[in-house]
Image (tube, rainbow, N blue to C red):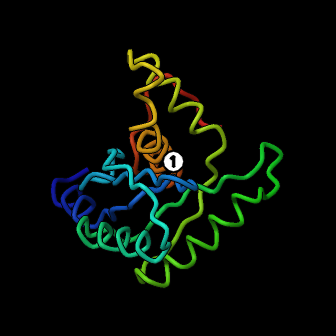
Amino acid sequence: MKLEAWREKLETQPRYLGLDVGNRRIGVAVSDELGLTAQPVLTLERRRNQREDLRSLARLARRFAVSGIVVGNPVHLSGELSPQAAKTQVFAAELGELSGLPIHLWDERLTTREAHQILYEAGHSRQEHRRVVDQVAATLILQSFMEKQGTGIREQGTEKP
C-alpha cells in the first residue's frame, strides 16, 4: 500500500465507544485512533437517575470524538432476547437519541465469563474483578465488533466464529 493511501486510511478510521451495560455498572472502552485495538476506559457506577448515566456516556463520546457506540446486547445462548437485552436496547436507543450517534448492538454472549477468565489468568483475585471486569467485557465487545468490521487486530491463534 502506498504511503498516501495508508495515511488516508488512518485519517478516516472511525473511533467507537464500547459499552457493557449492567444494572449496577457500565463498562466503557474506546477504540484507539488507528482503529486497531479497544482499550478499557472506566467503569461507570450506575446512578438512580438513568438520564445522568446517559449524559455521562454522551460526554465520554464527545471527549473521545467517536463516530458510533457499540453496546453489548445480552441475548440468551439460544439467541433469543433476554429481559436484560430488552432493557439494554431501550437504554441504547435513548443514548443514541441523546448523543446523536449511531448505535450498534453487538452480541455479548459469554464476554463477562471471558473477562473473568482473563483477569484470573492475569493473577487478579476474584475480589479485584468487580472493579474492572465490566471494562474488560466492554473491551472484548468492542474488539469483536472491530474485528468483524475488518479494522481491529485479532489475537494471534484465535479463530473467528
Dividing the picture into quadrants, the one containing residue 73 is bottom right
Tell me the amino acid under the disc marked 1.
Ile
| Horizontal side, residue 138 vs residue 35: left or right | right
Q: Is residue 66 above or below residue 146?
A: below
Secondary structure of the residue carrying tag 1 is helix
How many labels, in total?
1
Question: Can you give x and y, in whole percent of width and height, for residue 21 in the image?
Answer: 53, 56
Q: Residue at x 39, y 60 (%)?
A: 17
Name the residue nearer the viewer: 36 or 112.
Answer: 112
> Label 1 belongs to which residue?
141
Q: Quadrant of the C terminus?
A: top right
For residue 116, above or below residue 125? below
The local crowd at label 1, few if under 14, some if 14 to 19, many if 20 or more residues have their Cα within 10 Å, is many
Q: Is residue 73 left or right of residue 40?
A: right
Residue plotted at (77% across, 48% down): 76
Q: Is residue 130 left or right of residue 4?
A: right
Can you give x and y, in whole percent of width and height, for residue 31 in the image? 33, 53
Q: Residue at x 67, y 66 (%)?
A: 87
Question: Relative to residue 61, is residue 129 depicted above or below?
Answer: above
Furthest residue toward front: 48
- Drawn side of residue 89 relative to residue 42, left or right: right
Q: Which residue is pictured at 33% across the width and 69% down the height?
A: 61
Provide residue 39's location: percent of width, then percent of height. 32, 45
Q: Where does the image place residue 117, in percent across and percent down from the top left? A: 52, 23
